[in-house]
Amino acid sequence: MRTSLSSGLAATSLAFLVVGLALRSWQIVLLSLPPVIFLALGSLFPPPTPHVLAVRSLSRDRVQAGWDVDVELVVHNDGPGLDLVEIVDVVPRELVVVKGTNHAVVSLEKGGEIPLSYTVRSAVKGDFHIGPVRARSLDPLALGAEDAVVRVDSRLVVAPAMEDLRRVHLQPRRTRPWFGQVPSRRIGVGTDFWGIREYVPGDDVRRINWKASARFEHLFSNEYEGERSGDVVIVVDARRESFIGTEEDNPIEHGVRAALAIAEHVLASKNRVGLIVQREVLDWVPPAFGRKQLYRILDHLTHVRPGGEWPFAHVAWVLSRFFPRDCLVVLISPLQDRAALSGIIALAARGTDFAIVSPSPLAIEWRLAEKGPEHAVAYRILQMERSNMIAQLSRIAQVVDWDPTTPLALALRRMGTRPRPA
Amino acid sequence: MIPGLLRAAPIAAVGVLAIWTAADLFAMSDGRSASLLFELLVAGAIVLVLAGVLRRMWLRPIGLTMVVAAYMIAHAIFLGVQVLPALAFLVILIGHVELRILAERFARLYEVALTSQERSRIRRALGRAALRLSIASVLAVVVPVIAANLAVAGVVTVTTIPSAVLLASALIFVIVMLAILPSLRQRTA
């Protein structure tokens, strides 16, 4: 492959030649020689095509966002000696090299090896592939180059950061017939006192209410409120219109982090959790219990990328078709789509419980925007509009307007009160 | 120190070219033409500085062309072409471009923490490139001078038009061969 410098030198040489002949000046004709000498030297020692092998190892292949991963790459020259070779280990743009280098320009003798070690960090979640390794044998006079690509891919899965929601009270209101930790408003196995009834043979002695039995001269047993489990479906709005801000600071990235934290919290409370993601495709995970389900949800959330324009009506259809009717729907959305509000209201009217966590796009934009007086006025107007919309939604759902700079747990603690009936 | 030197070398080379051109322009007897060419030189220098400050790489060849054009016009029309200085000027010009490419390749490698082994490998590669550039620069001056001496001494007569045309044809053939050599090599490989 010739470079632009080689073409430039050839053109300069020809220009001197033509001008020299036109002006009949042998001195100018002579000036056409230096570029030709450079070209000749470049052609006498052309860069050989690199034949290199590469082996890469990662300290970890699954990490949390913000964690460091050490990468070791060893490039072995299996071909002729390379006077000047540029080696680049191609790293996705989301990964930042924080230590060492993934790039080298060295000379590599036949059979020689060059180790490259560097540390990468990703501030965003994702499923990344490091590689391939590109080697470019360069002419020291920059007149030509030969490329080789070594297909060595290493997968690095970066999961969203997990938030601690231990003290948050987020649970389904309606329960299923399985033991759990949600008060079911039915008599059953639990710890909260419900009432007393006459003793029947077979009742546990420990449940006898001795005070009532002494007063009425009959045996009475305590009854407790059964603690059952319920279903929660998390809906993540990752549509293109929800992407506001930067790669690291946008409602989708924060929403995914919130979804994972909520899923972990709800699953830890022995409830079933399902997931629906509105992105380029509408994908979902049916509700299930346990650690495996958390990993399933984590896997889906890791692959969330902004895209698609699915209307909320499709989500409503999936909810009604594939998910239990009496589940709590946790919608995580910046609420940019006004048309979705009517869908939410319609679903709530049919009895679906809603909790809405809305990473505030206004807060993100305000952080990134210029802060002139006119911007402050615009911000206040938009803030009022958003507050009105949230007040409207608060009639049918528990709504949290979340500034992503604050911890999610803090925002979710405001979610205790039940909405008034619509 | 190496990255600093690498970054400074092309700037120094273009500085030498500009000062050299300015000195030649001051030696011109035709004041009006000299001032016009001086304006062209200053404009070229400004464009070069702007290219560096604003990081607009496409401006750089324009500035360089303006500086070189001021020198070439001054010598081709007013001052006459002296072979040795002209060759030196041309080699410094080519050297400037080569040094800039070297600086772009190597200087940023030193910006990260490197082990002594990596550093020595990079230094070795840089040394080879610098050696090749030095050899090419010396040859680019020496070979034309020898050719000129031979021509003037009459060993090879190039003072007639047919021999000049013959020489030109040979040069064109060499350039064309050099230009298409990589494609021919790829086809045969």
Image (spheres, rainbow, N blue to C red):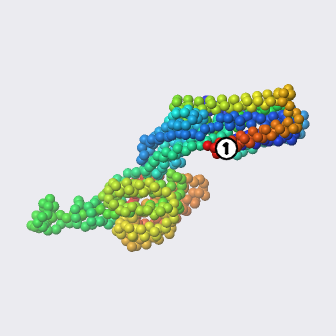
Residue B153 is left or right of residue A164, and the answer is: right
Residue A259 is left or right of residue A95, and the answer is: left
User: Which residue is drawn at the image coordinates 50% and 58% (left, top)?
Assistant: A306
Q: Residues within 10 Å of mark 1 (few under 14, many from 20)?
A: few
Where is residue B119 drawn, in percent x and y? Answer: 55, 31
Q: Quadrant of residue B73?
A: top right
Q: Is residue A226 visible?
A: yes
Residue A179 is left or right of residue A5, and the answer is: left
Where is residue A260 drawn, in percent x and y? Answer: 40, 55
Where is residue A284 drawn, in percent x and y? Answer: 41, 62
Callout 1 amino acid = Leu
Q: Which residue is most to the front?
A: B188
User: Which residue is drawn at the image coordinates 15% and 64% (left, top)?
Assistant: A221
User: Which residue is drawn at the image coordinates 81% and 34% (left, top)?
Assistant: A30
Where is residue A68 drawn, in percent x and y? Answer: 45, 42
Residue B25 is left or right of residue A155, and the answer is: right
Q: Quadrant of residue B83?
A: top right
Q: Is residue A127 above or below residue A340?
A: above
Instruction: Report the number of numbered marks.
Output: 1
Q: Which residue is most to the right?
A: B30
Subunit bearing disc 1:
B
Q: Which residue is mark 1?
A: B184
- Which type of secondary structure does the marked residue at label 1 adopt? helix
Tell me the quarter of the image containing the C terminus of chain B: top right
User: Which residue is drawn at the image coordinates 76% and 30% (left, top)?
Assistant: B143
Q: Which residue is most to the top?
A: B153
Tell me the quarter of the image containing the N terminus of chain B: top right
Q: Is residue B85 visible?
A: no
